[in-house]
Image (tube, helix red, strand yellow):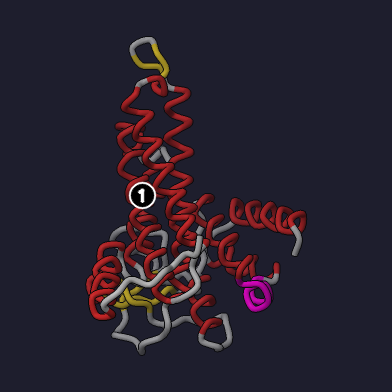
Amino acid sequence: MDAAEEHLLAGTLRKTMTAASGQALDAALTDLGWAELLAEQPDIAVPLTFRLLGETGAHAPLLNDVLLSAAGQPTGGTLPLPFTGGAWVAWERDGTAAGTALDAELPLRAVPVGAPVSLAAGRVALGWWLLGTGRAMLALARQHAVDRVQFGRPLASFQAVRHRLAETLVALDGAEATLVAVDDELGALLAKAAAGKAALTAARHCQQVLGGIGFTAEHDLHRHVRRAMVLDGLLGSARELTREAGALLRAGGSAPRLVHL
């Protein structure tokens, strides 16, 4: 797939995600050939699709497909997913389990402990989703800072606001760099941790920039904040994965080179 084809695909996916979410989006992506794209070009399918899920605020049970495909199993089903705090959940495809404590839109339900599977591919996918969510929050906060006038001056002219937005951008760009560099399970673990931390940083700073309007049901920020909190907890939170990475490095007695410059 060349750059022009990828750009066209991105436009189609964005339009589809803007028009549908959940079970309807799952069906629409199936019609667009999501399973075939994932099988043939996962290096394009995963970053592009999951980043756009974050940017548009849509959701679909595609994490199941990524993990099933990585395990060599047919896509289209579900499987237990580890969640922060030792819990396990299932991301249902029919939407009947919607109503989690944090994000009522997501069809997640608690399930018994599942069989261990390789989580690397799923962590990378969630990392891209978190990155897209973080960039969506940054775009909302930036637009508010440009439009809002406070004490006779644009909000964007205040240094404290600029610093919060800049720190958010640095965190997101750093997380993207770790996602691009992933080539093994440890890299996937660290990338998911970096993306989760960056998305939560974006939530904190963007909420401060938006102020009270960010808490209202009429503004989209609160939806992205809830989504970031849930996605951070799936397949290990940033805090848990950072501790796990530290334990692995201590056990190995050295830190491997993850990126060759």
Magenta highlight on residue 200: no
Query: In which quadrant of the rendered view does residue 204 lie?
Result: top left
Region rendered in magenta: 34-42
Between residue 29 and residue 236, name the one nearer to us: 236
Classify 10 Å Cα crowding around label 1: few (below 14), some (14-19), many (20 and above).
many
Judge whether 1 appears above or below 212 on screen: below
**Is the N terminus in the top left, top right, bottom left or bottom right quadrant?**
bottom right
Q: Residue 150 appears at what percent x and percent y?
A: 35, 16
Q: Amino acid at mark 1?
A: Val
Q: Is residue 253 left or right of residue 67?
A: left
Q: Which residue is mark 1?
A: 225
Q: Residue 124 appears at what percent x and percent y?
A: 47, 68
Q: Residue at x 45, y 51 (%)?
A: 133
Query: In which quadrant of the rendered view does residue 24 lie?
Result: bottom right
SS category of the residue bearing label 1: helix
Q: Residue at x 47, y 24 (%)?
A: 146
Q: Residue at x 46, y 73 (%)?
A: 122
